[in-house]
Image: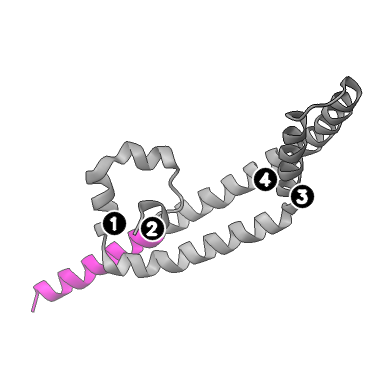
Amino acid sequence: MRVLDAHPELTDTEVLELGVKGWMKLLKGNKGEEKISAGLKDNYRADIDMLKNEYARLFELRTEIEALEAQLEGELTDEEKSAIEAQIAEKEAELKPLQDEYKAKAGELKDAYKESSKKARKEYRAEAERRQNGNKGK
């Protein structure tokens, strides 16, 4: 299991900064917490998928821009090159606001997931501690 699969709220950079010991700690975790966070993780991924569907045009534009940029690598007249560059500029102008909106919404989803995951883990630990303290008296 990859760390990013278990903790999609982390970025690649954050995972690299944790190092192997941090990965082991994250992956070892508490089995009860994993069950709780699995549901939250599934919801987070579903929300991200819905966001990607909502912003399908963003991904289409990226593909179109890449295709146009690939055309620029061929032998073209100055006119053809200018026309393709104009198309790229037009698509990039449409792309920028969509990309900014998408990143903002994805960030909000990530923050909400982190917060709810943190809260669920805290509640689970508190409940486990209550059970453990209740069993000490027996």
Q: CA distance from mark 2 to mark 4?
A: 23 Å
Pointer 2 or 4: first along the chain: 2
Check if mark 2's residue and mark 3's residue have beta carbons within 8 Å: no
Q: Which dot, 3 or 1, sits closer to the camera?
A: 3
Q: Is 117 left or right of 84, judged from the image as shown?
A: left
Q: Which residue is mark 3?
A: 57
The amino acid on which the numbered mark 1 sits, given as a three-letter code, is Leu
| Residue drawn at x 74%, y 40% as measured from the top left | 67
Residue 115 position in % (x across, y down): 46, 52
The amino acid on which the numbered mark 4 sits, given as a three-letter code, is Tyr
Residue 126 belongs to magenta span: yes
Pointer 3 or 1: first along the chain: 1
Is the C terminus in the top left, top right, bottom left or bottom right quadrant? bottom left
Rendering colour mode: one colour
SS under mark 2: helix
Q: Which dot, 4 or 3, sits closer to the camera?
A: 3
Q: Which dot, 2 or 3, sits closer to the camera?
A: 3
| Residue drawn at x 91%, y 23% as measured from the top left | 79
Q: CA distance from mark 4 to mark 1?
A: 29 Å
Q: CA distance from mark 1 to mark 2?
A: 7 Å
Check if mark 1's residue and mark 2's residue have beta carbons within 8 Å: yes
Residue 85 position (above or below residue 40)? above
Q: Is 22 left or right of 83, judged from the image as shown?
A: left
Q: Which residue is mark 2?
A: 6
